[in-house]
């Protein structure tokens, strides 16, 4: 497990809960799938390999999924995202290129490069139309990146899953990437469970955190439950 320090460790179900994306969709993207007699390879390989057949994800996989899901929700077919990832790997030099800060500036050009010519010789402009203006591309990317802190090399470093207001962070170097109170590093699930048993004041005293940190943990964990129910 020591090799996972700084990487993070999530099951597809945990990733789906955090990202508000159905678990089967995440599994298809990371394992590949077959449909209508055709095989679709994985969009990319997970950065976590524990040496068995189980699927686990790392922090970079979470960040990559957030961007891929945003594009798919905007109408970009998964097959074209796969092509864009391949091109971006070469252009940016990263195995998980969509989650890098460089993709914010280079991504529009990368997507335009994969506009295809159909059998009739006509250029298919679905992606070109989607990103004809820079603000359209930024309108998809910027909301994803504004809750992420980046290292100097442009790679994602921290994620604030509820925005910065709650002061809850996902840091792959702490608690294997589970959501934590940023001030104390105590996992939010631990604080919320303690509050349920001992009350907010008792949980705050027991873990030497502020009561506001406990309240924020409760709010955050409740929001995850709402996402599952939705």
Image (cartoon, rainbow, N blue to C red):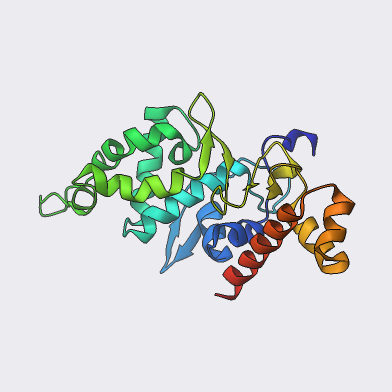
Residue 124 located left or right of residue 35 = left
Locate residue 168, reporting x and y percent. 64, 49
Along the line of sight, the residue nearer the viewer: 40 or 168: 168
Can you say which quadrant of the picture contains the N terminus?
Answer: top right
Q: Is residue 9 visible?
A: no
Residue 141, percent from left and from top: 38, 46
Give the quadrant of residue 115. top left
Q: Residue at x 84, y 66 (%)?
A: 199
Q: Quadrant of the C terminus?
A: bottom right
Q: Say which residue appears at 80% left-offset and 56% top-offset.
A: 190
Report the side of 110 relative to 116 (left or right).
Answer: right
Q: Residue furthest bottom?
A: 229
Q: Position of residue 11 (x, y in %)?
A: 68, 55
Q: Residue furthest top?
A: 152
What's the residue at 61%, 52% (across, down)? 166
Residue 70: x and y in percent read 40, 54
């Amino acid at each position: 497990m020591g090799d996972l320090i700084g990487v993070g460790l999530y099951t597809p179900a945990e990733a789906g809960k955090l990202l508000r994306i159905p678990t089967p969709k995440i599994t298809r993207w990371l394992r590949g799938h077959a449909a209508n007699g055709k095989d679709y390879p994985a969009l990319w390989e997970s950065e976590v390999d524990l040496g068995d057949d189980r699927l686990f994800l790392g922090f970079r996989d979470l960040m990559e999924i957030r961007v891929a899901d945003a594009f798919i929700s905007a109408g970009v077919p998964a097959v074209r995202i796969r092509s864009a990832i391949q091109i971006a790997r070469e252009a940016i030099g990263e195995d998980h290129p969509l989650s890098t800060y460089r993709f914010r500036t280079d991504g529009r050009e990368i997507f335009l490069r994969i506009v295809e010519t159909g059998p009739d010789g006509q250029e298919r402009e679905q992606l070109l139309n989607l990103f004809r203006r820079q603000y359209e591309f930024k309108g998809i990317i910027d909301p994803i990146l504004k809750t992420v802190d980046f290292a100097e090399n442009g790679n994602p470093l921290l994620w604030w899953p509820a925005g910065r207001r709650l002061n809850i962070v996902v840091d792959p170097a702490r608690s294997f990437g589970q959501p934590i109170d940023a001030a104390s590093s105590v996992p939010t699930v631990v604080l919320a469970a303690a509050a349920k048993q001992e009350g907010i004041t008792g949980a705050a005293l027991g873990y030497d955190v502020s009561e506001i940190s406990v309240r924020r943990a409760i709010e955050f964990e409740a929001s995850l439950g709402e996402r599952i129910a939705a």
